[in-house]
């Protein structure tokens, strides 16, 4: 699930690679962060975001989650390459989900 803060390429690249990505901007525009985290958790989805607030919600507040991927590009001038990221992410997402189901309290962080 991609948070509303995610730029279009961050959503399109994983979709083009065959991932089922729900974009909050398309399904629940303006939803509160807590509602987004809850939906991702209830759907068993890893949350992709460019917003650091989700780390606070999930980690510091102890909210349940299938995982959070924080995406940060070096600068506005640097061209993001989400296609390269999406090719590398499937194994990481799988490892993250496995860790979140284990007794590891830190999940995949």
Image: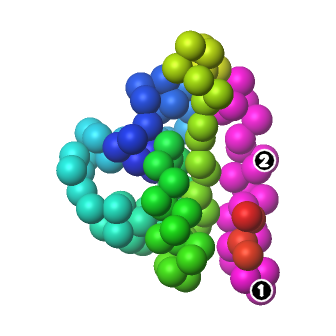
Specify whether residue 7 is in view. yes
Residue on which the image places disc 2: 91
Give the camera-side residue of 54 and 108. 54
Q: Quadrant of residue 31?
A: bottom left
* Callout 2 secondary element: helix
Tell me which residue sits at (55%, 63%) in the image.
Answer: 55
User: What is the number of the mark on residue 103?
Assistant: 1
Q: What stretch is highlighted in magenta?
A: 83-105
Magenta highlight on residue 97: yes
Give the camera-side residue of 80 and 104. 80
2 or 1: tag closer to the N-terminus: 2
What secondary structure characterizes most of the magenta part?
Answer: helix
Tell me which residue sits at (31%, 67%) in the image.
Answer: 35
Q: How crowded is mark 1: few (under 14 residues within 10 Å), some or many (20 or more)?
A: few
The picture places residue 68, in percent across and down from the top left corner, at 58, 58
User: What is the number of the mark on residue 11?
Assistant: none
* Callout 1 secondary element: loop
Tell me which residue sits at (59%, 24%) in the image.
Answer: 75
The picture places residue 71, in percent across and down from the top left corner, at 59, 41
């Amino acid at each position: 699930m991609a948070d509303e803060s995610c730029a279009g390429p961050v959503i399109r690249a994983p979709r083009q690679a065959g991932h089922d990505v729900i974009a909050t901007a398309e399904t629940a525009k303006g939803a509160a962060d807590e509602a987004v985290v809850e939906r991702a958790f209830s759907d068993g989805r890893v949350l992709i975001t460019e917003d650091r607030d989700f780390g606070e919600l999930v980690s510091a507040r102890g909210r349940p989650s299938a995982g959070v991927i924080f995406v940060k590009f070096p600068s506005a001038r640097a061209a993001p390459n989400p296609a390269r990221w999406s090719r590398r992410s499937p194994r990481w997402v799988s490892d993250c989900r496995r860790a979140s189901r284990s007794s590891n309290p830190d999940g995949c962080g």
